[in-house]
Amino acid sequence: MGIKRHGTTRRYSDFVVHNSTVYVVEVPASLEADVATQTREVLTSLEHYLKEAGSDRSRILMANIFLTDMSDYDAMNAVWDAWVPEGSAPARACVQVAGLAKPGWRVEIALTAAVK
Amino acid sequence: MGIKRHGTTRRYSDFVVHNSTVYVVEVPASLEADVATQTREVLTSLEHYLKEAGSDRSRILMANIFLTDMSDYDAMNAVWDAWVPEGSAPARACVQVAGLAKPGWRVEIALTAAVK
Amino acid sequence: MGIKRHGTTRRYSDFVVHNSTVYVVEVPASLEADVATQTREVLTSLEHYLKEAGSDRSRILMANIFLTDMSDYDAMNAVWDAWVPEGSAPARACVQVAGLAKPGWRVEIALTAAVK
């Protein structure tokens, strides 16, 4: 079964498709913005990748949300809840980590989604 | 390929099935209990969802266990080891996070499992 | 669809294969070594398991990298970047956790990969 990679560097790919499933991870574009802005940046980018992969935000199977501060939970959720199409929410784990790769990042999201 | 969701809210689904695989995440029912009690609560609920999805605890492929205190490791494992059918243990990552969505939660578990 | 487990204990399996996909997690062999050494240990072991499973390091779909100290990021990446075959990098999440199961461990890596 084939593997399709997109945006591949030495370190990571923007997304990878195999067996009707796409794996995609995103971090914020900005380093100083609040969590609502960063969550919007991450979800906008993820949506773009999902479409490129032949999926979309109604076909997400599993989400892993990593926050650096759980006091951002409600603000992140407000953006998330509005972004996920009604009736299409994935299984979701959400944890506070001790840090992300860049100090200003407040959220990182990994998705597994179904490809059409 | 179809997607089956169960217990879907605006934010998450209790579980999602696609391509013979189920994705499911659970947190404790109680906020004040010790980690053994919370692990039992989580695993009992996960077992219920696995059955609903057409899987069971002998068909788990991957587990991500998030603890808020690694000193809970042995007590969590005692419950886990007794719950997993002999010969059926999944690949498993276990890390201590900086926090979970509710302050009293000591464990969150995400599973990927095979559907029959 | 069948499930193949390898190195199964009461607690975990070294890897599990289902539906053309392998799930594998590894921690360091050493407790006192620096992150470069521990990353090499982890990747060497993962490579062995991937081959046993009928996959290899050019077929990784998703990586979850857990570090205990984000100041290890560059040293871990130097080993990672050299290990991943050019053009084959997976989707990748990398977070700093509050701790791993043994105090001396600095890195834990979970992979999802395609089986040939």
Image (tube, coloured by chain):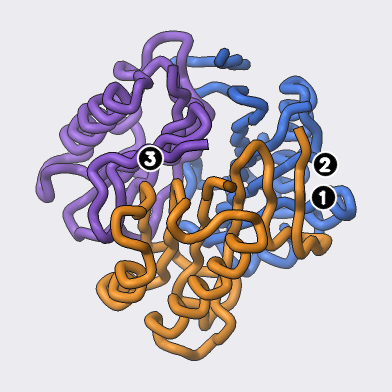
Chain colours: A purple, B blue, C orange
Residue A78 visible within the image:
no
Mark 1 packing: few (<14 Cα in 10 Å), some, or many (20+)? many
Mark 3 packing: few (<14 Cα in 10 Å), some, or many (20+)? many
Q: Is residue B99 left or right of residue A70?
A: right
Tag 2 residue: B58
Chain letter belonging to callout 1: B
Chain letter belonging to callout 2: B
Does residue C46 sit above or below A30 in this rendering? below
Tag 3 residue: A16
Q: Residue at x 35, y 21 (%)?
A: A54
Q: How many marks?
A: 3
For label 1, the SS is loop
Of the 4 image quadrants, the one containing the C terminus of chain B is top right
Tag 1 residue: B88
Q: Residue at x 34, y 54 (%)?
A: C89
Mark 3 and mark 1: Cα distance apart in space: 28 Å
